[in-house]
Image (cartoon, rainbow, N blue to C red):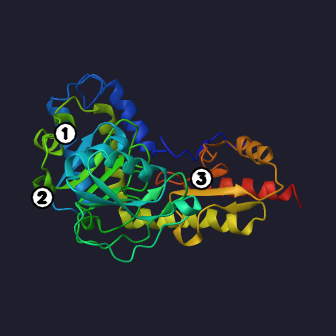
Amino acid sequence: MNNKVHNFSAGPSILPNIVFEKASSAINDFNNTGLSILEISHRSKDFIEVLDEARSISLDIASLNKDDYSCLFLQGGASMQFLMVAYNFLNNKAAYVNTGSWSTKAIKEAKMFGDVSEIASSADKNFKYIPSISTINDGFDYVHITSNNTIFGTQFNSFPETNSPLFADMSSDIFSRNINFSKFDLIYAGAQKNLGPAGVTMVLIKNQLLDMIKRDVPSMLSYKVHIDKDSSFNTPPVFSIFSVLINLRHIKSEGLESIEKKNSEKSKLIYDEIDRNKCFVGFSDINDRSHMNATFNLADGYDADIFKSICSDNNISGINGHRSVGGFRASIYNALDIESIKTLISCMKEFESKYN
């Protein structure tokens, strides 16, 4: 049996080997300083260069003008962004599209600061589809979506048209496909899905948004403060940002078009097997299936313990579905190679053979 572990975890998730190699080397000696990346000052020249490069590459990958947008690396995860977005920009009324657990939590936080209009929702079918949005009325402070839903396995294929600022939580599909990032006024993403280790959150924000801020915001929750202080108002998560930088270099080198092509190929393989195999049933609607998180259940009458045992014997890790959905979830982020997909498919076929 091959000793390779196939990591399908939804997050913290698989990363490219180059991240582990360079990060582990930097733990021993960062940039020939004789110091570990874990102990260098966040005010040091060496780390400031890391932070500057990470911000610059992020904007480059997204094809965003550095004069129009800022890139921040903050703490608190996407959950903190649920709060920060509303604290800074919800003055009167905001629109939210509710497509799962994370958007539900974002809505809850936003309601503390103003009126929230849930303009579309897929809660009626346990979030197994992306609701259609024909037109969005003017007058909202912003419109908020969650581009990909890790728990339910759905993903926006196209984005709403609106005259209001468009915000997106892209935690689980940032830089996994080639999209028009300039369509958005604010994007945030917890790193632990596709960018790097847990502990840092990327924010891409249009600078003009700062003119919208009408209330006094505590310094740690103020986008303006974090922009003015170059993401170093407080001590930033040095090691996490360095690890993200390594991955960003890798992403830029490969290019989003190539990454999207590979992700589409991987997701097609696994969805084709789900649809072909009598033992499995896909959870999400076919037209809204995520290219990052494939969710599926066993058909009636099949033993989950047998399938789990087969997966375990083949070193498949992190395949269990979220407790709110059950079943199984294969997270197929950028760094997951096609060999792992083929191994999972082989397990699914082996499971099927036991019932023939």
Please identify the quadrant where the C terminus is shown: bottom right
Which is nearer the N-term, disc 3 or disc 2?
2
**Real-space Cα distance between discs 3 and 1?**
34 Å
Image-quadrant location for residue 353 = bottom right
Task: Identify the residue shown where x is 28% and y is 59%.
Answer: 94
Q: Is there a contact, CB below 8 Å, between mark 3 and mark 1?
A: no
What is the crowding at mark 3: few (fewer than 14 residues within 10 Å), some, or many (at least 20)?
many
Q: Which mark is residue 330?
A: 3
Amino acid residing under circle 2 = Gln
Amino acid residing under circle 3 = Ala
**Real-space Cα distance between discs 1 and 2?**
18 Å
Q: Which mark is residue 231?
A: 1
Residue 12 located left or right of residue 215: right
What is the crowding at mark 1: few (fewer than 14 residues within 10 Å), some, or many (at least 20)?
many
Amino acid residing under circle 1 = Ser
Which residue is at the front of the view, 318 or 242?
318
Which is nearer the N-term, disc 1 or disc 2?
2
